[in-house]
Image (cartoon, rainbow, N blue to C red):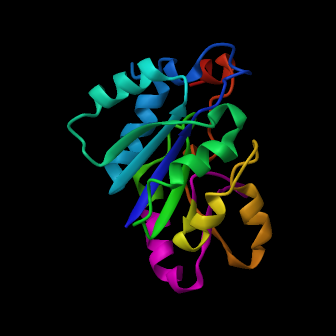
């Protein structure tokens, strides 16, 4: 099974307010759109919020209550950085064959990209791949990690996320060309939201 970990524990410093709650042109909040996209394509989704997100965790749990394959967690070490958040979240995925690492501020990843990443994993599974989608020469997200790397993900710290693992195993990285601009389209500032 391939699951997805949505990293939603950041501080939104560049955005100024909590960007996860910002409203997209279709009327949904950024965090909800990211969860919907992943949940419609994947067998299991973990949403890793800040430890202090008690209200948001309750709202999302209620909002997605009918979808039992979505787990909302409050990452206990989220204030220490993305690496800690990801390490907390991967503990909930011991039975997965691979994990897609998604960023909550990237709500436009298409269903076809999830499918392509899954197909690429199936084709390369025996080589313990790390699969990076590439749009017009730019690396993007989500990045797929074989379960081979889960122990290392579980030891991540700081704010670099899983980039260190990608750098450690360049021979295992598969660059997957996609036609989806959503893999590079994140929302970091209010201006990014206005461009939509």
Q: Residue 68: x percent and y percent? A: 25, 45
The quadrant holding residue 178 is bottom right
33 sits left or right of 168 in the view: left
Q: Residue furthest front?
A: 76
Q: What residue do we see at 45% from left, 48% from top? A: 110
Which residue of the protein is positioned furthest toward the left in this rendering?
66
Return the residue nearer the eye: 43 or 196.
Answer: 43
Residue extending farthest bottom: 126
Residue 181, x across and y down, in percent: 58, 46
Does 119 appear in magenta? yes
Q: Nearer the viewer, residue 87 or 192?
A: 87
189 left or right, relative to 58: right
Give the residue drawn at x 35%, y 22%. Answer: 59
Q: Quadrant of residue 11?
A: top right
Q: Position of residue 80 (x, y in %)?
A: 71, 36
Q: Quadrant of the C terminus?
A: top right
- The residue stretch that appears in magenta: 115-143
Q: Nearer the viewer, residue 80 or 48?
A: 80
Task: Answer whether residue 63 is visible to the viewer in this image.
Answer: yes
The residue that appears at 65% across and 24% down in the rendered structure is 192
- Label tally: 0
Asked whether residue 180 appears in the rendered view, the answer is no
- Queried whether the magenta region covers residue 123, the answer comes back as yes
Residue 169: x %, y % from top left? 75, 73
Quarter of the rendering occupied by the N terminus? bottom left
Please state which of residues 121 and 150 is positioned toward the viewer in this rendering: 150
């Amino acid at each position: 099974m391939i699951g997805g970990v949505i990293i939603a524990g950041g501080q939104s410093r560049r955005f100024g307010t909590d960007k996860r709650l910002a409203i997209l042109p279709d009327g949904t909040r950024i965090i909800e759109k990211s969860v919907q996209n992943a949940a419609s394509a994947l067998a299991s989704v973990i949403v890793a919020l800040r430890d202090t997100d008690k209200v948001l965790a309750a709202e999302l749990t209620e909002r997605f209550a009918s979808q039992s394959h979505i787990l909302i967690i409050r990452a206990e070490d989220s204030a220490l950085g993305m690496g800690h958040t990801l390490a907390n979240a991967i503990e909930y995925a011991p039975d997965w064959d691979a994990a897609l690492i998604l960023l909550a501020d990237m709500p436009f990843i298409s269903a076809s990209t999830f499918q392509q990443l899954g197909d690429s994993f199936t084709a390369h599974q025996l080589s313990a791949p790390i699969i990076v989608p590439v749009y017009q020469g730019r690396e993007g997200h989500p990045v797929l990690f074989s379960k081979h790397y889960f122990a290392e993900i579980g030891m991540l710290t700081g704010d670099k996320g899983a980039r260190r693992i990608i750098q450690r195993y360049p021979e295992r990285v598969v660059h997957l060309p996609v036609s989806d601009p959503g893999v590079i389209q994140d929302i970091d500032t209010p201006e990014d939201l206005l461009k939509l």
